[in-house]
Amino acid sequence: MIHVENLSVSFGNRSIFHNISFNIRTGEKVGLVGENGAGKTTVLRILNREILPDSGIVRGCDKGVRITYIPQSLSFSTATLSMDVLSFMMEGRDLVRIKHRLAELENIFEKCDGSESQEDMMRLVGEYTELQDAFKNRQGYRADDDILQLWAGLEIEIVDFDQTVGTLSGGQRTRLMLARMLFEDSDILLLDEPTNHIDESSVDWLIRYLSQSRQTILLISHQPAFLDRVVQKILFLEKQTGSMFSYHGNYSQFLLLRQQEEKTEGRTRKNLLREIERQEAFIRDARQIQSTQKKSRQKVVEKLEHVLSETLGVQKRGKEKKISFQFRAADPLQTQALRFEEVKMQYGKRVIFSDITFALGPTERLGVVGENGVGKTTLLRLVGRDLVPTKGNVHINKKAQVGWYKQEQEDLHPDLTVLAEAVSAAPHHNIRSIRAALAHFLFSAERVEQIVYTLSWGEKARLVLCKIMLAGPNVLLLDEPTNHLDTFARSSLITALSEYQGAMLVVSHDLDFFQQIGIPWAIQLPKGTLERTF
């Protein structure tokens, strides 16, 4: 069981959460939800022993407990890229080291000639027995089958076990890392937006995999359907109060319970205000006559003022603040936004796609779909003029003003403040209007002075969207825009995109998102054919 009691964390002068407590039973599957910046990832990092809280108790995550943490961003070291894919996977359970040492010991035993001391032999036999037990306990005998199952489920195409990690495409590489982390088969599994790394078909497989797992699971996800099908309990981390609340059931049941609580609290608050008004009227009357009354009357007033103060000071749950914004094309296009003519893209000997032909009207919207590694982001980079096609032509309207949401948010300057970053995107706006725009994206007067690198992934996503809004583009390029957004921000983005009057090219693995923003057609890569999204 994971037991967390009175956990508090702050960064500088900013309190992230205060005195939160929760329990997760062994084998329980729990969703962690809350606004971007509420501290969800921080909770996972504390449980993974990466960072220490300011105060509080954490039990059940001690060093003897095997924990796997799958973060939002998966990276590879240079040494890892040169490993063969099978060894890379096997390292997830430390099987490479165990097998290597077992082989060494077996070689030693074969060369024994009877001259070795009994003490040395007993020590080596003891080590060999321990390693055999470890190999068995880590499911070493079924490791190959487990690996093939993970590769099939995550649609990882491996043609040769000796193939090195570095030869895989970026998308395949990312899924291989996810497969390796799942292969670890640890006691506790911590997942931070795991569906960001995989396609829709793999999401269905992951849901089944997690549902059948015996591990204790705590996961963060922005996909309600994913949470509904996996978790049995929701932990809600409330940003406004820095508090945590626990709800039994899946995400949909959590939303219903929250709505019921808000209605009840609304009625309680109304009754409370009515009583406060009555007390205030009494105090005003008492004050008017206090100069002619005895001291006892003053004491009554003081008591009432104290009661009033205590009443007003009652702690109540905060109401989630909602993002509210619109994308407006400052200079709408009157003619075709862009056109691809028999475009081919090739890296070295590897052809990404070829013969891609399509056009996008001034207010038309089009999706881009396909498996990881087929060139979806590459297509956007061609429109954004980051790349030149190997063959064919990409025509961009001379009056096109492109707003580009990049999946990894690499255009942000990590050492700038939030305000300075926003100003860099809109130098012709005055500071007051930029501050007002940031406020629409929940960056308060205090938060706009925060340094960009200290923001959560979701907060960075909001900042990028704010910069795009300030720029007023007439063409939007969006690469997985919902990946890091909480459900509240996602809903606001859907509204803004639905009302947008410019051209739009959107990469997403979420077909529901296409339907919600009115994109019925998408380019299917690598074929380049137009296919219905819903």
Image: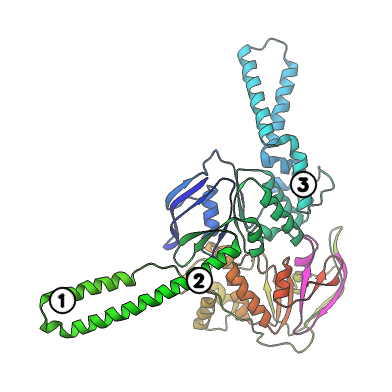
Going 61% across and 81% down the picture, which residue do you hit?
326
Residue pushed farthest top? Answer: 115
The three-letter amino acid code for the residue at tag 1 is: Gln
| Residue 298, disc | 1
| Residue 476 location (% of width, % of height) | 70, 77
Q: CA distance from mark 3 to mark 1?
A: 78 Å
Question: Coloured how?
Answer: rainbow
Residue 33 appears at what percent x and percent y?
Answer: 56, 62
Quick one: quadrant of the C terminus? Answer: bottom right
Q: Mark 3 vs mark 1: give the one in front.
A: 1
> Circle 3 sits on which residue?
149
What amino acid is labelled 2 in the image? Glu
Question: Is residue 41 visible in this depiction of the protein?
Answer: yes
| Point 70% across, 85% down: residue | 501
Query: In the rendered view, would you say 99 is above or below 195?
Result: above
Depth order, front residue of 435/150: 150
Examine the structure image and report whether residue 378 is included in the region drawn in magenta. yes
Badge 1 element? helix
Q: Residue at x 33, y 69 (%)?
A: 313
Kind of element beneath mark 3: helix
Residue 359 placed where, x, y %?
83, 79
Q: Which mark is residue 415?
A: none
Q: Residues within 10 Å of mark 1 (few under 14, many from 20)?
A: some
Magenta residues span 353-379
From the top left corner, tell me how far across and down residue 317 is, in percent. 44, 67
Above/below status of 108 relative to 307: above
Is 305 on the left or on the right of 393, as rendered?
left
Q: Does any portion of residue 50 appear in the rendered image?
A: no
Q: Which residue is mark 2?
A: 320
Depth check, front residue: 414 or 256: 256
Please tell me whether residue 500 belongs to the stretch shown in magenta.
Answer: no
- Horizontal arrangement in the rendering, residue 235 relative to residue 186 (left or right): left
